Image (cartoon, rainbow, N blue to C red):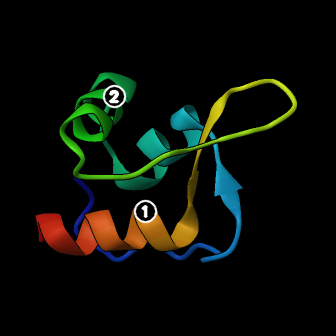
Amino acid sequence: MKQDEPKIVTTAKYSISEVAEILGVTTATINRWTAKGMIHAGRRRLNGRRFWTGAEILRAWRAQM
């Protein structure tokens, strides 16, 4: 996990690979945290893919620090 708070847009939607890069962890870690409810994902209506908001990323980062 990166030590510096991520500089992201809180209202933006991020893919799993973007979230992993922002937080400095693997996509498997993001999947595990999502399954455990540590970070919450939404679903896109068009294609059903998951996304994470910037606000949720910051919340998860702060909880881990």
Tell me residue 28's x, y (percent). Answer: 31, 22
Res. 23 mark: none
The amino acid beneath tag 2 is Asn
Dot 2 or dot 1, earlier in sequence: 2
Q: Residue at x 67, y 27 (%)?
A: 49
The amino acid beneath tag 1 is Ile
Tell me residue 62's x, y (percent). Answer: 23, 75
Within 10 angstroms of label 1, few (less than 14), some, or many (20 or more) residues?
A: many
Question: Can you identify the residue that label 1 sits on?
Answer: 57
Question: Which of these two is toward me, 5 or 49?
Answer: 49
- Can you tell which quarter of the image residue 64 is in? bottom left
Tell me residue 25's x, y (percent). Answer: 30, 39
Question: Can you identify the residue that label 2 sits on?
Answer: 31
Count the labels in the image: 2
Tell me residue 7's x, y (percent). Answer: 53, 76
Task: Give the structural element (helix, strand or loop) at label 1.
Answer: helix
The residue furthest right is 46
Q: CA distance from mark 2 to mark 1?
A: 13 Å
Within 10 angstroms of label 2, few (less than 14), some, or many (20 or more) residues?
A: some
Q: Residue at x 62, y 39 (%)?
A: 15
31 left or right of 7?
left
